[in-house]
Image (cartoon, grey):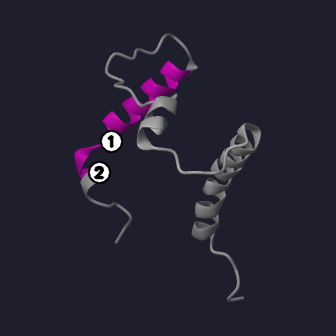
Amino acid sequence: MSDSLHRRDFLKTASAVPLALARAARSEMSGAPLQNPKPSELSARIKLQAFNYQGVRLLESRWQQQYRSARDYYFGVLDDDILISRSGL
């Protein structure tokens, strides 16, 4: 099966499809031909951005319990166990 599509190639293609469909629909609704947006237009349309999590605090919830449980587990792992594999090799 040399004609098979590899997973990585599929994911690259699949991630581009919604963008292409959205651009085609927008172009069709406005009657304008498809064209690549300018960087200034892209920055004006950005709705979500990463932000600094330094001031974020979890309130009493299952998320806080999960965070504390994971933190306590990893803080309990000895440094030697992290640095040296104990798989018996």
Say which residue label 1 marks.
77
Q: Please tell me whether mark 1 sits on a helix, a strand or a loop.
A: loop
Which one is nearer the viewer's eye here, 1 or 27?
27
Position of the N terminus, as image quadrant, is bottom right
Q: Does the magenta stretch include residue 56?
A: no
What is the number of callouts on the image?
Answer: 2
Q: Main secondary structure of the magenta part?
A: helix
Q: Is residue 34 toward the left or the right of residue 74 in the image?
A: right
8 versus 39 height, above or below: below
Amino acid of disc 2: Ile
Q: Is residue 10 toward the left or the right of residue 79 in the image?
A: right
Q: Position of residue 74 (x, y in %)?
A: 36, 38
Which one is nearer the viewer's eye here, 75 or 89?
75
Q: Is residue 71 magenta?
A: yes
Q: Where is residue 10 in the image (x, y as percent from the top left)?
A: 64, 66
Seen at 27% across and 44% down, the residue is: 78
Say which residue label 2 marks.
82
Task: Please rate how many residues cluster around mark 1, counting C-alpha atoms within 10 Å: few if below 14, some from 14 to 19, many from 20.
Answer: few
- Magenta-drawn segment: 63-81
Residue 11, image quadrant: bottom right
Amino acid of disc 1: Val
Q: Where is residue 71 in the image (x, y as percent from the top left)?
A: 38, 31
Do the CB atoms of the residues marked 1 and 2 lie less than 8 Å apart? yes
Residue that extends furthest to the front in the rendered view of this protein: 32
